[in-house]
């Protein structure tokens, strides 16, 4: 065997590593933190020393100009400790009570950790339904966008106090993936109690190998997933694979990394072992494909030439450029956009119900509050919720 042949495996590994994404290339990063990382199971208290290192990492990303969001578990784990609930599975009503108490402690914990580094934390409580029903989806998305615009760090958690099936079957891995795509994050980092996806469960197979990159989720990749890894965790590698499907379909790269170490995100930045799940798209492109091909149009807006030129140059559609409203659509519904001749030039998600759209059509955005009796969004369709012919 020649020396060149011997070097091939090493060369292949080096080439794979060189081709992997790097943290510096991402502009909006969501970090998911599980209960088993945040809460000491023996004491039922926050691991403050570890959290301080993560907060340092978040502050570093934020200082570099990246938008940072957090999805944090831990409310039930903290609440059950405060209430003195016995270890083991909880009844639904006990889970909800624990979440109600623990959410206060969790929010305070993140506020203090980030505030100590000059960052403002904003709490957002969601359920899966908030990411699926379009009206609620748009409201949550707008809140996240506004917090980010103010350079705050949204801290998202599942609304366990009112959820039912989510408490018994849900997990924050999939919730993080849904919120990441909703927020147009280009990277989701799942901090875990394992270093990534292995060829077999490492606790069962000492010969299991870490998979550094997954270009496509296949049945073989899904077969590598095991069950939940800890008593506090409601997920496991299986839910992380499902989260990867959601994220990559929505144009978001995802990484599973070891969160048990200090400064887990900085270590990832320095090239620590992890598993990357790659997407061939980006959040904006994936979203436009969804609007263009997956939603039934419930109405139509006819616009003038000035508005057409504006949206073709990348701007949002303002009420002033709308000349005609058709259909009985609701806020969040997909509507067609037509030019003055009636030809379809695009489609998008409406920011107003048809009745309100009718009232503000042709009027300046500054008149919206007077016309509707309440403040409203300046755009009738935001540019991020719009796809034009030829896009």
Image (cartoon, grey):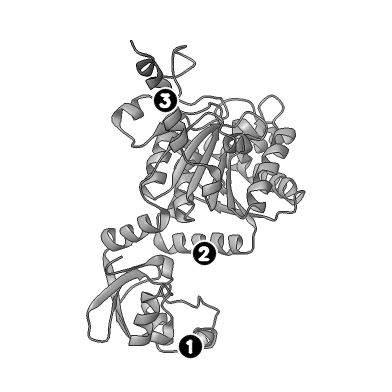
Look at 43% across and 37% down and name the residue there.
19
Split into 4 quadrants, where in the image is the N terminus?
Answer: top left
- The circle on residue 69 is none
Residue shown at 68%/48% (left/top)?
59
Quadrant of the frame with the C terminus: bottom left
Q: Earlier in the sequence, mark 1 or mark 2?
A: 2
Between the residue at mark 3 and the residue at mark 1, the CA separation in whole angstroms equals: 61 Å
Which dot, 2 or 3, sits closer to the camera?
3
Q: Residue at x 74, y 36 (%)?
A: 48
Residue 6 or 250: which is nearer the viewer?
A: 6
Task: Determine crowd level at label 2: few under 14, some 14-19, many 20+ residues with C-alpha closer than 10 A.
Answer: some
Disc 1 crowd rating (10 Å Cα; few below 14, some 14-19, many 20+) is few
Rounded to the nearest whole Å, what is the CA distance between mark 1 and mark 2?
21 Å
Q: Secondary structure at mark 1?
A: loop
Residue 83: image x %, image y %? Answer: 69, 36
Q: Tag 3, which secondary structure?
A: helix
- Of the two numbered discs 2 and 3 on the same chain, state the one appearing first in sequence: 3
Confirm whether residue 174 shows in the render.
no
Q: CA distance from mark 2 to mark 3?
A: 46 Å
Q: Residue 351: give x, y in percent of width and height.
A: 43, 72
Tell me if 81 is positioned left or right of 3 in this view.
right
Task: Please report the residue visible at 44 percent of the width from the left and 16 percent of the height from the top.
Answer: 208
Q: Name the residue that disc number 2 marks.
A: 142
Residue position for label 1 = 364
């Amino acid at each position: 065997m020649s020396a060149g042949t011997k070097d091939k495996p090493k060369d292949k590994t080096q080439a794979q590593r060189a081709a992997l994404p790097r943290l510096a290339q991402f502009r909006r990063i969501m970090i998911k933190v599980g209960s088993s990382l945040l809460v000491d199971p023996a004491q039922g208290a926050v691991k403050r020393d570890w959290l301080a290192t993560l907060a340092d990492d978040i502050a570093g990303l934020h200082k570099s100009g990246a938008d940072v969001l957090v999805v944090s578990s831990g409310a039930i784990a903290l609440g059950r400790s405060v209430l003195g609930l016995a270890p083991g599975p909880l009844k639904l009503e006990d889970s909800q009570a624990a979440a109600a108490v623990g959410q206060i402690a969790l929010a305070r914990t993140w506020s203090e950790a980030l505030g100590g580094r000059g960052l403002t934390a904003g709490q957002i409580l969601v359920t899966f339904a908030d990411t699926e029903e379009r009206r609620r989806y748009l409201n949550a998305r707008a809140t996240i966008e506004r917090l980010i615009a103010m350079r705050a760090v949204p801290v998202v958690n599942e609304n366990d106090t009112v959820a039912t099936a989510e408490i018994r079957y849900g997990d924050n891995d999939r919730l993080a993936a849904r919120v990441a795509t909703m927020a147009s994050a280009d990277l989701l980092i799942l901090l875990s109690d394992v270093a990534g996806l292995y060829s077999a469960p490492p606790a069962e197979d000492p010969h299991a190998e870490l998979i550094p990159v997954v270009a496509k989720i296949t049945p073989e990749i899904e077969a590598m997933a095991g069950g939940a890894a800890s008593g506090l965790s409601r997920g496991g590698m299986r839910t992380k694979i499902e989260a990867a499907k959601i994220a990559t379909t929505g144009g978001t790269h995802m990484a599973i990394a070891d969160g048990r170490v200090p400064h887990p995100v900085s270590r990832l930045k320095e090239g620590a072992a992890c598993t990357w799940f790659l997407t061939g798209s980006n959040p904006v492109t994936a979203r436009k494909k969804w609007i263009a091909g997956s939603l039934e149009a419930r109405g139509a807006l006819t616009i003038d030439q000035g508005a057409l030129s504006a949206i073709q140059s990348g701007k949002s559609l303002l009420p002033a450029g709308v000349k005609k409203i058709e259909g009985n659509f609701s806020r969040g519904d997909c509507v067609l956009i037509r030019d003055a001749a009636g030809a379809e030039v695009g489609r998008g998600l409406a920011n107003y119900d048809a009745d309100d759209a009718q009232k503000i059509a042709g009027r300046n955005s500054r008149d919206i509050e007077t016309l509707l009796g309440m403040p409203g969004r300046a755009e009738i369709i935001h540019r991020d919720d719009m796809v034009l012919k030829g896009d």
